[in-house]
């Protein structure tokens, strides 16, 4: 029996190195025991890990790596063994990572999903409270959170990006993390009493929460699913929830009684703005794919809800992810310049993306864009379709192949469909061109100039179509 001791419960690198050596030595999963720190359960220590050439390696599908990085954060003590067994399984059958009916893959996938839910809950339910500054030191904010799994270190980057200019600490029973605006430090676990119990600003927040509470839209079951009671102790607004629920029916009746009675000849239909506002609020808590775990926030579309032109990009970039708005980064600057030259008013245009969360990989402190894959595009097509239904633009312009695929539901070649309208079943028109980020990446100056001119021609075609054609409003 081989005994592997990892440095920490979330030690993915340690597990990967040990699993690599074991797999190259063809050690069966049942002959390995996995432990964390000094908690080895093997009385006699077990056999040392087999020695292999440090340069030896093997490839596994990227989806397996992504799955393992999430599942290893679970609190199940069997996760390391399950992942090693799945690694051997994947080496024997690489295609198994796409087989959702495989029992072992399904079990590991359930671990990963539970971790992603826990990460989402931490994003949503961490509440910082200010503590009194000492000797002129900057204000510091402290939060208490009790995760179900080992997600604290993996989640640190989200809070650093979200609260980069704030000095804060997040205390949990297992470990604590502290950010001073420049360096992240780790500390031992804490107790609930180590965090402040209240904050003067909370009264303002409670007033706001009470004011926006809509009794007519109350769904207790859905609320309890998204905001389980275990988190209520950390949420200042939670103290209001029982009374708000108890009085919801009476408040709803009062709202109905105070509403003007519509004419019998007029059907009460929600406006596009009401539909869009509700849709955007719903999208802010989207967990339809794993991208929400690493992105800062959902980046929804923006613009007039009566716009006659909708422009669809691929996904938010780094700056869009931080700002929460589409096309505010370098690609957005290229687009703005071209729109102005084509006499298209951005303020009268609705802009959105096919995928609503920023997909990236970390290289040092930089977040490098990664192209969304089919499952992510398909998960977000649900949002895009509802945006199109809410805005109902006569003309849609897709920037790049990902956007075109999201609108059409199938892959197309830009060169084959560019420059002509594609009629949609709803009566709208789709036009397809390249994404502005493509124009920024062209190394040859002459080629870049030609492609930018062609991009501008595409925009002018759309402008002419908006001006000169009679388009059905769907």
Image: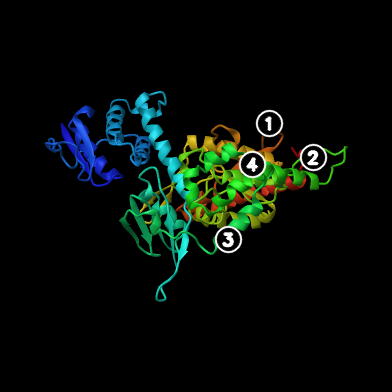
**Residue 127 at x, y percent in the picture:** 48, 55
Residue 76 makes an appearance in the image: yes
Q: Earlier in the sequence, mark 3 or mark 1?
A: 3
**Residue bearing the label numbered 4:** 218
Work out whether residue 142 or residue 98 is closer to the camera in this orientation and state it.
Answer: 142
Q: Mark 4 near mark 1, Cβ–Cβ under 8 Å?
A: no
Query: Looking at the image, which residue is at 34% across and 38% down?
Result: 68
Q: Earlier in the sequence, mark 4 or mark 1?
A: 4
Query: Looking at the image, which residue is at 48% across and 38% down?
Result: 289
**Residue bearing the label numbered 2:** 268
In the image, residue 99 sits, relative to residue 282, either above or below, namely above
**Residue bearing the label numbered 1:** 425
Mark 4 lies on a secondary structure that is loop
**Residue 456 at x, y percent in the picture:** 62, 51
Kindly report the distance in space between the C-alpha atoms of the residues bearing marks 3 and 1. 51 Å
Q: Earlier in the sequence, mark 1 or mark 2?
A: 2
Q: Which of pointers 3 and 2 indicates the residue nearer the eye?
A: 3
Q: Earlier in the sequence, mark 3 or mark 2?
A: 3
Kindly report the distance in space between the C-alpha atoms of the residues bearing marks 4 and 2. 21 Å
Residue 61 lies in quadrant: top left
- Point out which mark residue 203 bears: 3
Crowd rating for badge 2 (residues with CA inside 10 Å; few <14, some 14–19, many 20+): few
Q: Earlier in the sequence, mark 4 or mark 2?
A: 4
């Amino acid at each position: 029996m081989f005994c592997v001791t990892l440095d920490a419960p979330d030690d993915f690198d340690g597990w990967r190195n040990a699993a690599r050596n074991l797999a190259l030595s063809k050690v069966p999963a049942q002959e390995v025991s996995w432990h964390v720190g000094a908690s080895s359960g093997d009385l006699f220590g077990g056999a040392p890990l087999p020695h292999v050439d440090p340069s030896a390696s093997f490839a596994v599908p990227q989806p397996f790596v992504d799955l393992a990085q999430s599942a290893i954060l679970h609190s199940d003590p069997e996760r390391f063994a399950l992942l090693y067994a799945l690694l051997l399984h994947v080496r024997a059958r690489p295609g198994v990572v796409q087989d959702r009916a495989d029992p072992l893959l399904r079990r590991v996938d359930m671990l990963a999903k539970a971790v992603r839910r826990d990460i989402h809950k931490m994003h949503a339910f961490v509440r910082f409270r200010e503590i009194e500054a000492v000797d002129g030191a900057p204000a510091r904010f402290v939060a208490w959170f009790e995760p179900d799994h080992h997600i604290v270190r993996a989640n640190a980057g989200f809070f650093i990006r979200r609260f980069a200019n704030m000095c804060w600490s997040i205390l949990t029973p297992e470990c604590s993390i502290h950010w001073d605006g420049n360096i992240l430090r780790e500390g031992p676990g804490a107790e609930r009493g180590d965090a402040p119990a209240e904050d003067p600003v909370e009264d303002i927040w409670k007033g706001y929460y009470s004011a926006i509470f809509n009794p007519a839209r109350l769904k207790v079951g859905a609320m309890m699913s998204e905001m389980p009671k275990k988190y209520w102790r950390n949420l200042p607004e939670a103290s209001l929830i029982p009374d708000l629920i108890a009085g919801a029916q009476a408040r709803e009746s009062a709202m109905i009684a105070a509403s003007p009675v519509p004419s019998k000849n007029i059907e009460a239909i929600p406006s596009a703005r009401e539909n869009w506002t509700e849709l955007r609020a719903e999208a802010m808590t989207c967990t339809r794919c794993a991208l929400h775990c690493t992105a800062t926030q959902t980046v929804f579309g923006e613009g007039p809800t009566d716009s006659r032109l909708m422009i669809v990009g691929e996904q938010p970039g780094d700056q869009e992810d931080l700002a929460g708005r589409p096309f505010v980064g370098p690609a957005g600057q290229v687009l703005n310049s071209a729109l102005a030259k084509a006499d298209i008013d951005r303020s009268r245009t609705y802009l959105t993306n096919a995928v609503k969360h920023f997909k990236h990989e970390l290289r040092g402190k930089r977040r490098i864009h990664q192209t969304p894959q089919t499952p992510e595009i398909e998960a977000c097509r649900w949002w895009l379709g509802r945006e199109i239904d809410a805005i109902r633009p006569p003309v849609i312009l897709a920037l790049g192949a990902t956007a075109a695929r999201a609108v059409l539901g199938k892959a197309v070649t830009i060169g084959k469909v560019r420059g002509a309208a594609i009629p949609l079943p709803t009566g709208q028109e789709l036009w397809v061109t390249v994404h502005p980020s493509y124009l920024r990446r062209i190394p040859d100056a002459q080629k870049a100039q030609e492609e930018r001119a062609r991009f501008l021609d595409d925009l002018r075609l759309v402008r002419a179509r908006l001006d000169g054609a009679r388009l059905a409003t769907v």
